Image: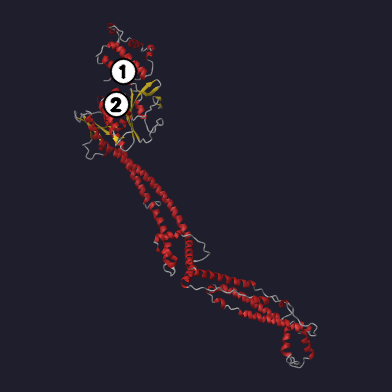
Amino acid sequence: MKNIGSYKETKLETDKRINLIFGFNGTGKTLLSKNIKIDNEYIEWDEKNIDEIITFNTDYILKNFYEVKEKFEPVFYMGQNPNIIEKNDTIKNKINNITEEIRQLEYNTNNEVNKSSLIIMKKNHQEKLEKLIWNIKVELEKKDIGTILLKDMNKKGKSLFLKSFLDKKIIQHNDVTSSDIYTKLYRLKNDTGITPTLEYLNLDNIKKIISNDIFNKIIVGNKNSKISEYIEKLNNAEWVKQGYTAYIEKDNNICPFCQKETITNEFINSLKEYFDISYNNDINLLNKLLNNFDDELNLLNKNNYIDNKYIQAEIKIFDEKYYSLINKLNIISRQIREKILKPNIEINLENIDNELDQLNNFINYINKKIDNDNNEINNQEATKTYLVNIFWSIKKTELQQYINDINNEIKQLDKQIIVCNNKIIEKNKELTTLKKEYEENLTKFKNVEEAKKNINNQLKNMGFDYFYIDNYIDETIINSPEEDKHKYKLVRKDQNNNQDFHSFSEGEKMIISFLYFIEKCKSAAKIKNIIVVIDDPISSISNNNLFEIAFIIRKLTELKNQQTELFKQFFILTHNIYFFDELKRTINHDASKLFQIYRTDKGSIIGSLNEKNLYKYLAFWQTYKEITIKKNINQILLPNTMRNILEFFYSIILKDDFNKLKNDSKYSSLYRFVNKETHFFTDEYETLPVDKYIALFEQLFKDKNYAHHFKAMIKE
């Protein structure tokens, strides 16, 4: 201990289970007992599993013996402060309030954030989502292909179905719709035939006609002909050619307009000369190309395509692309005819590549669908599995935003529920602590009642048969208050109960408190690892029973739980040399260690006990009492006895030099008196003021702050 009261710096080191510590009054025993604590930073415990240190000292008596005045009777609370009754009432009110707060948090509908309403809101959100998902199953069961789409999910209960749906992964499905899935599955179910692919449109012959150079050639007759100038002015040689062929070659000299013979041979020869072989060959080629073009055009048959169900499904797109090509071909046909009529003009025929490519690309798109469907038909089970997965992916995608919104709302509700739960948990913790404290307080009173019986038995065994403890009952009150159930009184057998008792004696408080302490130790040690500290259990009333008290303590040290000692360690402190000797003599020597507390100018110190000197010192005081009080021994031995006491007191207790008194003006005469020893003549001694030296002897102890020690040593 360092800088604690009178202890400047000292140490008590022990590995023994029972430690007996002797110290005269005022040396610091009680201070030591108050500082043997688990949490004392200056104490090092070899074992860390110490639950409690129970200490008996004056503080314990004050805390466990509460005297109250009830109609002049010595009434008291034993073991617990009477305020515990009031405290338990306060605790009970707190318990009720917290219980109501918990109920408010859990159920009260007036509170918008109570746990119950939050859970209901969460449940409503979950049920709304579950109903939406469950309806998918309900609707599918109405369809022919429902069994395919539900597949294994149809066998699951509602909760498993919902979990299975929510666990579905979203697969990329390239804008495929639920309707597409239905169509494919219906076809797989009802149609196992393979659909041939469509032929692509081949217009190579038409493209070859269009690319002929004749359309870019300016075709005219023989310019050396006399009539060429007039035909060119008409700018319609083909019209002239048709007239020549139709009329003049049949009727050589009759004009087709006036029907007169106005056409001469010269005119006929001029026409023949103009429409020579080269001209005719070009015109014939144009007519041939036109005929071939018309033939190719007539070969195009829309019916080859529109009977196909895939084309039918997208007939508008097909018609748009098909007629776009046909319209372009009709334009080209008109261009060729115009060229024949006006061979002397240059014509650039329309290009069909773009229209043809678009139509063939569409046919290719249809063929891919056909190939895909054919492949699905050839691999029906794999296709069905794929389509089912896509279907549920589509449904999950359709509901995903709603699911996310619901889940976010549920998360928010869960957070609020967690907040409520945390509040409820904290309140329940507080409630548990209060209930535990409440029950412990009740248990303490119950334990006191049991202890009362044991204390009365022990008082009887110790010879205290003139009083015992009984419950206090105020007979003037019909229904006694709760706290009266825990009041006790001393019943004295040799006195009238109605006599005026102003207070309990210190000895009575001491013995009752000590016996209650023993009962408490026995009770606590059953469930805890206990260290027991006992400070001076011997008082005026118990001094005559020091052997019984020593016996009780020894029995306490010997208590065992099966083969293990019930208590971890004992520290027993006393100023009473006889009590100390009785304990030392009767306890287990191998398990004990002896110490003494000394008081010096440097403060209190703890050291080993010098038993021999201690008993000598006690014997000197006994001689002093025989000389001065009992008058059984001749006073001539008084100086020597005083000197022996003072030498021991100075050297052992004060840790000082006794011979310093020689130069002390107040006590130098006492010093000379005690140093005479027995070298007095009887008549000389009788002339000395012996009473003065006895008074100085007592005053010396007072001046050294050891008046209590002096009184203790001369007491019987």
The answer to which of marks 2 and 1 sits earlier in the sequence is 2
Q: In the rendering, which numbered label is found on residue 552?
A: none
**To which residue does mark 2 refer?**
583
Residue 456, position in %: x, y? 23, 32
Give the class, few, some or many, for how many residues have Cα within 10 Å of label 1's Cα (few <14, many ≥20).
some
User: Is residue 692 visible to us here?
Assistant: no
User: Is residue 661 visible to us here?
Assistant: yes
Helix, strand or loop at label 1? It is helix
Residue 610, position in %: x, y? 34, 21
Q: Residue, x 52% and y 69% (percent of image)?
A: 375
**Quadrant including the C terminus:** top left
Q: Is residue 577 above or below residue 314?
A: above
Instruction: Give the left or right position of residue 395, taking residue 446 as reference.
Output: right
Q: In the rendering, which numbered label is found on residue 616?
A: 1
Instruction: Give the left or right position of residue 128, taking residue 487 as reference.
Output: right
**Dot 2 amino acid type:** Leu
Helix, strand or loop at label 2? It is helix
Q: Give the number of callouts.
A: 2
Q: Residue, x 29% and y 17% (percent of image)?
A: 619
- Residue 256 lies in what quarter of the image? bottom right
Q: Is residue 46 above or below residue 283?
A: above
